[in-house]
Amino acid sequence: MTGSMSMKGSSFFQFLLLAAIVIVGNYWNFVGSIGNDVANKVTSKEYPRDATVQSTTNTTTTIAANRQDAPFIDYGNSNWCPNSICNNSPLCYPCKRRFLIIFASGRSASTTLNWMLDSLPGVRMSGENNGLLWTQFHFFQNTFCERNFIEGTNLKAAFGRNKIPNGALSCILQNSIEIITPPKLPIASIEKEESTIIGFKTIRAHTAKNRNEMEAFVKFLKEHLPCTRYLINYRSDTVAHLKSLKEAFKWEGNNVKTKVERENQNLKLMYELLGPDLSYMLDSSEWTKDVRILNKALDWLGFGQGCHFPSLLEFNTMKYKHTKQMFKHPSIFANCTRL
């Protein structure tokens, strides 16, 4: 009798164990089915360049032909970078943040342009950074394009590491820009901060020695800052430009003139390589005399007439003795919509 009850108890226990296994198995099958588009892809071991998504509208995401789907979030940035290619991975979403960068020659009213853009709602700019983009460009070339670094992928070798997902390196560059362009703390709204367009102006990022080097630099920008727009600002009035350099820095002579001409050539080449979808050319000899020319650039960026400047602001007119000014007239941007 006791043995019979023991056998029945054992059978009952086995039944409960089997039932539990079936229930758990069905549960995970259910989770797997509803999370197939996210969970399976996030844990995917391979994120080569085929994990590419092209953002087309604010509400839809189109997977490029013959591409593997990758975790992708459309952050409403499609109007800013409609043709951007986003190599997403669990480590980095390169199109999550919108950037605005000014490439300019020195003494071309670039500081004025920078802080005028900073005064727009939803835009935060920072000043010079001593050639961050150019420094990062060479850092990427010297490190991630180095033969030993590449051949060490998936090996336990001197240069070994796990495979770096395609696009993940973009966040190294993007995070460095975010850190040096911080919001005022504490942050009132995380959502608002993440949707803020951030950027800076630089007069030190167009020093390419030749066209090949400039092409490589622009390719680097397109790959690692895919959701970025560029304003290319130069000064066509060379005589006034040279006079300004002499007054500000005591620079003069044929070498200075040659340097200015080369800078302008490089800026025009940069515009050519970036193309009209990503870049807009500004001539400070023109827009400093007529603010409507600058307002056309705002139209190109996507800001409406409610964001147009009624006049110019002036910065850096007394070298570094000035204080950072901002628009103190809220009514000017009362009808300006945050992008």
Image (cartoon, rainbow, N blue to C red):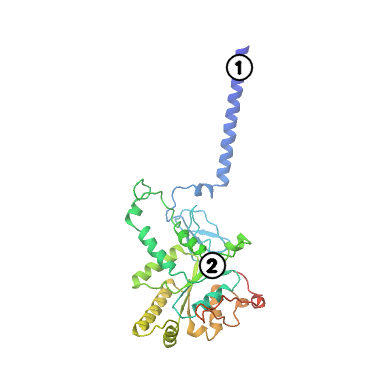
User: Which comes before the other along the chain, label 2 or label 1?
Assistant: 1
Q: Which residue is mark 2?
A: 198
Task: State the image coordinates of residue 258 (x, y, percent, origin top left).
Answer: 35, 82
Depth-wise, is mark 2 or mark 1 nearer the camera?
2
Is label 2 in a helix, a strand or a loop? strand
Please name the residue shown 38% across and 64% down the image: 138
Q: Residue furthest front?
A: 321
Q: Quadrant of the N terminus?
A: top right
Few, some or many residues within 10 Å of mark 2 (<14, 14–19, 20+)? many
Q: Is residue 297 above or below residue 93?
A: below
Q: Nearer the viewer, residue 312 or 255?
A: 255
Q: Is residue 273 above or below residue 6?
A: below
Is label 1 in a helix, a strand or a loop? helix
Q: Quadrant of the C terminus?
A: bottom right
The amino acid type found where label 1 is placed reads Ser
Q: Nearer the viewer, residue 248 or 57?
A: 248
Is the C-beta separation of discs 2 and 1 under 8 Å?
Answer: no
The Cα atoms of the two marked residues, 2 and 1, are separated by 73 Å
Please name the residue shown 46% across and 53% down the image: 68
Q: Nearer the viewer, residue 288 or 269?
A: 288
Does residue 101 show up? Answer: no
Task: State the image coordinates of residue 47 (x, y, percent, origin top left).
Answer: 44, 52
Question: Residue 196's image quarter?
Answer: bottom right
Question: Residue 291's image quarter?
Answer: bottom right
The amino acid type found where label 2 is placed reads Ile
Few, some or many residues within 10 Å of mark 1 (<14, 14–19, 20+)? few
Task: State the image coordinates of residue 63 (x, y, percent, origin top left).
Answer: 49, 58
Does residue 271 show up? Answer: yes
Task: State the image coordinates of residue 262 (x, y, percent, origin top left).
Answer: 37, 79
Q: Which residue is mark 1?
A: 6
Q: Is residue 67 above or below residue 292?
A: above
